[in-house]
Every structure is written in structure tokens, then in C-alpha cells.
Amino acid sequence: MSGCCQQHNSGHDHVHHGHKEMGDLSPQQKVGNRVQTPIRIMQMDCPTEERLIRARLENMAGVMAMSFNLMQRELLVVHQPHVLDDILEAIKSLGFDPQTAGIDVDVLKNSQQEGKLSFGWKLPVAAVLAISSEIIHWVEWPWVFSALLAVLAVALSGFGTYRKGIIALRNLQLNINALMTIAVSCALLIGQWPEAAMVMVLFSIAELLEARSLDRARHAVGNLLQMVPQTAWVYQAANGWQELPVGQVKTGDMVRVRPGERIPLDGTVIKGFSTVNQAPITGESMPVDKQQGDELYAGTINQGGLLEFKVDALAENSTLARIIHVVEQAQASKAPLQRFVDQFASYYTPAVCLLALLVAVFMPLVWGTPWLEAIYMALVLLVIACPCALVISTPVTLVSGLTAAARHGVLVKGAAYLEKGRKLGWLALDKTGTITQGKPVQTDMMLISKKEQIDGSLENSQDQDTVSLQETGVRKVAASLASLSDHPVSMAVAQAARQDGLQFHEVENFLALPGQGVQGVIDGIEYSLESPRHALDQGLLNALETKAIQGYESQGKTVVVLRCADWVMAVFAVADTVRPDSRQAIGMLHRQGVKTIMLSGDNQQTVQTIASEVGIDRALGQQMPENKLDAIAALQKSGMVGMVGDGINDAPALARADIGFAMGAIGTDTAIETADVALMDDDLRKIPRFIELSRTTHRILVQNIALALGIKLFFLVLTLAGTGTMWMAVFADMGASLLVVLNGLRLLSFKATY
């Protein structure tokens, strides 16, 4: 134990994943004989366009799979390499403008769909013409004037709709554009001039409003990037401090940020002290102190003093950019309720269209209804037949919910997790780093000689100097092993030795044993720093030593022992402190009807003490990773189970749980990528807020489905009763779509009640 060396610090490499902005699509990825190509289609933002493109491509030779993300206007196609040009041509034949990787961002932003988002002067003029046509018809002037104005109004406001409708009909698709084309054309043919014009104008206005509302939901998360400054003050050896675009700043550069300014890039503080508002990243309400060695995140606000920091990541790889990328990926996933709605809609449209055909043909033949009246009723039903409001209600609501969660510092990896969070019946929690601070300190050390283990005496016959030398040597060995572990208990042992100026040994063959401890070879001798369970089971500790360990544990302390073969050399006691918000978080969960259980590798006494302190329902100690897995499986028999953890030991249980929550994911790529839900700071109260958001999201989803179906059913009954009109049908379709979009957008301003 005499050969000392410099302390070994284990490094951690962080792999950052860049955010994909509009136009910054991933390049083609080739797997075997298949190519995966992302395609941006700026005109695609509704299930109408998705179904049209899917129908065109799904039977094309060489196309193997497709995935649509309407909120990001992105189509991912898996295909054989030689058919990409054919795919793009097929999409263009539908009236779209597909863009692949490498397209300029500004070009894409300006590539708006004709006739849908940008009407210019045409729509106001068309509205005036439609109203004039209605007035002429009402005052009974010659019908030709009313007809002429109506046709002009339809031409100005409906050209884009007609073009898309003809393309849809040519591809045997009964989407809203096809249905409106048929309905308005037939209305003109049967002499309903003013109504045909007004319907097309109202449809265009509603479509414009809906598109802009969808854009708000689509860009809600991406707009967070606008909080990041576009320039940074960078130190250059030749020119001193220079203001440069953030895109030109490299990792390792020195950046200065003044009080009141937003931090432009991720980095580590080199000089200065300040408080930083991290709410854009973590949702924290209170500023965080920052000093030398602390991490800074782009988009956060420097409040107190001048800070100089070293850049750790390029602008496109910042923590905020990664957060946005994760949420955008989650937006592409579908929740169970959304899949059900999509399936229901696939039957709804054909059913109503069939009903319209029956009305047009059988009502005159069976009930003697005048043919023009029956045809008019059928046209109204055709407009009602489009399921846009129903289908768009779920993705807009879920995207708004995912965005609201991100703004509160909660990253949800998929819409399914947001939807089922409301059903959690049990929440399992790790102890160290979750309920407690995860930064324990060494409080006690008991040195054990071989003689003491044999005769059971704790009396030391050696002089004080000899004991002191032995204690120093034992602590060096224990700290050398502990310094290579990231477990909080080991870190406490290493930190105590470091504070006393002890030098660490070089460790060979280091091995971390999940749920047990660590081991390694020092100067040719194998040592292990581990839980006392093994030593107790093997009878390596006498009665007095066992009693001392039990005394530590009864005080809520965690105990580890240093062992060499069958000799327990020392006992270390470490105490952790409970997070100040843990008790409040557990109380919130209980009020929501969620039961709690603590699963920890520590001894039962320590775990029970901590659990009682914060009010947790059940506590299980001495839990190996497989034991935690079994505990989760047992709980799942009685309902949906969530698991909260922050370490490798928790990975199996996090994976088995219905929802896995990762603590303190800020700056940690692994946690962001593997957890179902990542809490960007260490605040447990975000879990009950997530559950509240999940319940609110589900409530709005149900409201939207009820609105969409209820409005259509109401106007369908009115039409069959003979009192429905085409403008009512437009409201039933586009009006309902606008209502459900606006209702879903309410989630963007979600505020927790706790």
C-alpha cells in the first residue's frame, strides 16, 4: 500500500446530436440494398396530402416503407437506390414540390403552398364578389349577373382547390379538395350561384386560418432557438474580443457574456461568478449560481456578473438544439388514441359519401324528393364527409402537449408516453440521486485489523502513530478504488480522502459490479469496496463490528466495506441528505392517486428511514438490478408503473416500467436518448406536473374528438332533415377543424396547479 501515484480521473465523452432545422434534413442513409431518404414537402401539412402521397407511392416498385411527419412536413422513404428520381417525380405529379437534403433553409421557408397559405389580393376580392352575387340574387336582378360574379369569385378563391381536387380525383382519392371541387361545381350547375361562391370563399378563409394555426403548433418548439443570440463576443489572440456570428464560433473558443445577456453557446465557466436563469432549459423558477467549472447552456440568461466561458459544443449541437430535436422526433410518433382516430376516419369518409349517393338517387325515387333538392343535399353531405377536423385534432393537441412539457423542463420521447402518463398507478423511485441529493459525505470510518476479526476485540494494542499510519494506508486504497466509480457513495469516500490531501494509487483491472460495488488490483493485490452484505453473509464480521454497522444504518447512513480476500479492512459510513422538494413531490403524487415505492441497493434500514422521512408508501432495500426488475413486474399486475432513476443500476427497471423517468438529464446525452421521459433538472415535482399535463392533454383530446364528431353529426342530421346548407357544411368541416386546432393550442400555455 505504499506505492503512490497521481490521481486518475476518468473522463466522460459526450456525443452530441444536432438539431435538424427546416431544410437541414439528414442525408441519405444506406443499409444494405436499401436507402432511407428524408424528403421535405412544404405543401404537406394535413392528412389529406398524406393519404394522396401514400396512395401514389405505396405500390411503386422499389418503395419499401414510408413514414410521415405532418407537423414537420417531412416524408421518410425507405427505397432501393435507383428509384429516388421516380419517387420525386411521382410526388411532383401530385402538385407538390419535394425537397431533399442540402436545400437552402431560406428557400424552404419561402416555399409556401400556392392557393392555401398565400392568397394575396385574390381572397378579399373574391369575398366582395361572392357577397355582391348574394345581394344581386336577393334583390332578384337578372341571374346572369349573379352567376358571372359567382364564377369569378370561385375562380379567384378556388383555383388551388380545383387543381388539387382534380389531381385527387385522378388518383381516386376523395379528400377535402376533391369533395369541394365536386360540391361547388355541381352547385354551379344546378344554379346555386351565390352559395357556391360563398362556400368556396369561406372554405379558403377557413383553410388559411387553419394553416396558420397549425404553423403556430409546428414552430412552437423550434421558436425556442430564437432565444439564442445570433452573435457572441469571442476572444482572438490577434484582435482581442470580437463579435462573431455563433456559426463561426468553434469548440474551445473563449466567449464573454455580460449581465442581462443571453448565453449564446454551451460551455464551461472559466472566469467570473453570476446567477443564471435556466428556465428555457429546465423550467426552473429560481436562478442558479454559476462559477468556475460550472456548465452553461445556450439560451439561458446571465443575470448577475460578467462570465467568461470555454465553448463545449457548436451552435447546432447545443443542449437546447438537442432538446428541440428530441421533441420533434416525438411529434412524429402516434399515440394509441391517434391511431384509433386515423383508423376510424378511414371508414368515415366512404360511409358518408355512400350516404350522399343514396340521398341523391333514392330520395327522388322512393320519397319523391325533387331531383335538384336531393342533389343539393348530397353535395352538402359530400362536404361534411371529409374527416379533416377529426384527424387533425389529435396531432395538434399532442404536439402542443409535448411542447408545453419541454417548456417546463420535461422531455417526453413520444406521444404515447404523454397520453398514458395519466394512467400511472405506481411510481417506483431509486433512492440515491433521486430522493436524496446524490452527493453524500463520509461521516465515519472504522479500521479493522486481522487480530480484531479473530478475537472479536475492538481494543487497539498498537500505539496511536501506528494506527494513524494504517488508517492512512487503508483510506488511500479505498479512495483509489472509489475515485474510479461514479456511484455517489464511492465519490464521498474519494472526496473525503482528497480533502485530506491523500494521494491515490494506480488501479489495475478495475471493475464495477452493478449493485455490489467495485474491485481492482493495487500493487498486485486485489481489493474490493462493496456493500457489507457479502461480508455479513460469509461471516467475515464479528458481533461488535456487525452491531456497529447496524448502528450506522439505523441512523440512515449507507455503509461500504473495504475487503481484501477474506479480510474486511475497514468500514466506511456515508450519509446523504434528502432533496428539499422530495417530500412535496411525494405529497403531490399521493394527491393524484399515485402510490409510491422506493427501490434501492442500500440496506433495508437505511431505505426505510429515508422513505418514512419523505412519506413514501413502501420501501425495499438491498435491491440488485434484477430485483428491481422483478419488483416492477410485480407492480405491473395491478396497473401502470413508472420508474424514476439516474444510474446504470436502474436501466433494466427503467426499461421494464411503462414509463421510465431519468433524473437530471440536462447535459447528459445518454439520459436524453434512453429515457421515455427526461427531467432536465433534479426536481421530482416535475413528475406530478407531467401527470397533470397528461391528464389535461387527454381531456382536450376527448373534447376535440367530441367537437369534431358532434358538429359533423349535428349538420348531417340537419341536412337529412332538409334544412342543411352548403355554408353550414363548410363550417362543419373547416370550422370544426379550426375549433379543434385552437382548442389544442391551449396546451401551449399550460400552467401546473402545484
Image (cartoon, rainbow, N blue to C red):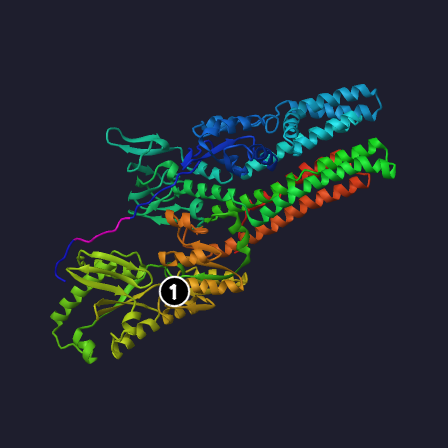
In-front residue for pair 450/202: 450
Say whether residue 198 is left or right of residue 623. Answer: right
Query: In this picture, which residue range is highlighted in magenta?
Result: 6-11
Amino acid at pointer 1? Ser
- Number of labelled discs? 1
Front in this rendered view, residue 19 or 503: 19
Q: Find numbered disc 1 in the image and state the secondary structure of the residue it sits on.
A: loop
Quarter of the image that includes the N terminus: bottom left
Decide: few, some or many residues near mark 1? Use Cα within 10 Å; few <14, some 14-19, many ≥20.
Answer: many
Residue 361 vs 511, above or below: the answer is: above
Whether residue 288 is visible to the viewer of this picture, yes or no, is: yes
Predominant secondary structure in magenta?
A: loop
Q: Residue at x 64, y 25 (%)?
A: 163
Is 107 rendered above or below residue 298? Answer: above
Position of residue 680 in the picture relative to residue 559 (left or right):
right
Identify whether 257 is placed above or below 446: above
Q: Is residue 271 visible?
A: no
Q: Residue at x 25, y 78 (%)?
A: 542
Residues 735 and 16: in front is: 16
For residue 10: magenta?
Answer: yes
**Which residue position is annotated with label 1?**
600
Q: Position of residue 518 (x, y in %)?
A: 27, 61
Closer to the camera in the image, 683 or 255: 683
Q: Residue 543's image quarter?
A: bottom left
Q: Position of residue 79 (x, y in %)?
A: 48, 34
Which image quadrant is residue 517 in?
A: bottom left
Q: Is residue 144 left or right of residue 663?
A: right
Give me the residue at 52% from left, 47% from top.
Answer: 415
Residue 461 pos. (x, y %): 13, 77
Magenta-drawn stretch contains 357: no
The location of residue 545, given as percent across then percent down, is 25, 76
